[in-house]
Amino acid sequence: MFNKLLIILCGVIFCNMAVASSNIKTSSEISLSTSSIYDFLERDESWFAIKDIAEKKNINSVTIYFQGKIDNNVTQSQVDDINALLTTKMQESGLLVRDCLECNKTRLHLTKTSIKYQRGLESNKELRLLGQEIQSDAFLMWRMGLSDSSQNITLSLVQAENNETIWADGYLMTKKEEEIKKELNPHQFGFAMSYIDLSGDAKVNGESHGTFSNVTDFSLRYYTRHLPSERLHFAVIANYFQNTDRNNLFNVEGGGIEGRVLYTLTPSWPSPSLYIGAGSQFVEGKNSFAMRSGVEFAYMKNGFFDIGVAYIEKNSFKSKHQGDVVTGKFGGAAVDFTIGFRF
């Protein structure tokens, strides 16, 4: 029976991986959407205006300068993509684009009471001096903000010789509450198989006998829905287990239910999540307190695996084997390795 279940689970996981590999999203699709920002930047009106004012102000060269901050919402790859798009637009407007290494440097300021990090330039004077050093007539400065409810970008063309803002534009899109609710990560179900290093011991007429060294656990899971930016979510798990190596002396099987809290450390792959859960396990007719804790990692599209510790309250069990009284013990803490998928 167990061998058949193992074969079925492995087959389902393999099929899930195959389907996922054909539906892997690009980096721009995985992160918070910037599609409307790209649409805004593709408008010809802005670049016609820049070309016109550059001719009037005798601007021949420009440097792209991102003033924002890299974090979980605005990623380095998104900044690089938009920098590349802005560079193309500037070149198409007839302007020479100069690189700026100083614009991306991070500086550390130490005081007696604090540590501060400063990215890029700190003053107007630095901007003027940098313009002279890299022979850039102006800086195209931009910021971007992304969240579950809004996305925005601001652009300004600043003349290097006098720090005058000679052109500015921006875009802001906010979503209604109804739209945000529709974009909640949907509730999911999951199916998993666990290898738990819990052993069982038995005594026959007072003499100790080793029996089994691990149990195999199958679980069905329900995950609550949440916003993509929310790191805390919950799961309810129902499970069934029995010792992997069956023998005629002492065997255990049982099932139970667990409530679990998960906290995602970072949404970036492999999206590690800390988890802790507690519940009850009914083992051979006895109710035992149980806990699990560890780290869950994502793989492919919907797959996951857990590495952690499982604990089941230790109990004694009595049975008969060939007329002899068998006293078995099962429970304790052990390593828990789980693999599964969400659907």
Image (spheres, rainbow, N blue to C red):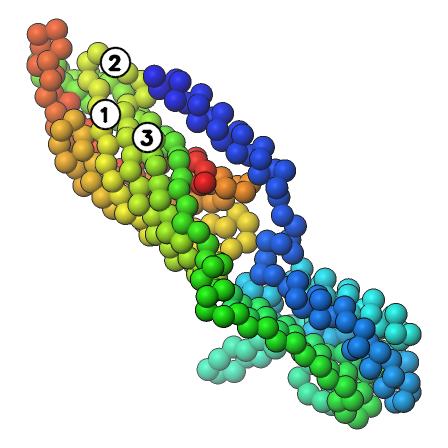
Q: Is residue 196 above or below residue 272?
A: above
According to the picture, the residue beneath numbered tag 2 turns out to be 247
Mark 2: secondary structure: loop
Dot 1 falls on a residue whose secondary structure is strand
Specify few, some or many for label 3: CA neighbours under 10 Å numbering under 14, 14-19, or 20 or more.
many
The answer to whether residue 320 is left or right of residue 227 is left
In percent of the image, x 78 and y 80: which residue is there? 139
Q: Of tags 3 and 2, which is closer to the observer? A: 3
Q: Which residue is mark 3?
A: 217
Disc 1 versus disc 2: nearer the observer: 1
Residue 288 occupies which quadrant of the picture?
A: top left
Q: How many marks?
A: 3
Vertical side of 152 occupied by 301: above or below: above
Q: Position of residue 104 (x, y in %)?
A: 70, 71
Kindly indicate the quadrant of the structure image that contains residue 61: bottom right
Packing grade of label 1 (10 A; few <14, some 14-19, many >=20) is some
Q: Which mark is residue 253?
A: 1
Q: Which numbered disc flags the more N-terminal residue, 3 or 2? A: 3
Q: Closest to the observer: 164 or 114?
A: 164
Q: Amino acid at mark 1?
A: Glu
Whole-angstrom CA distance, mark 3 to mark 1, is 10 Å
Q: Secondary structure at mark 3?
A: strand
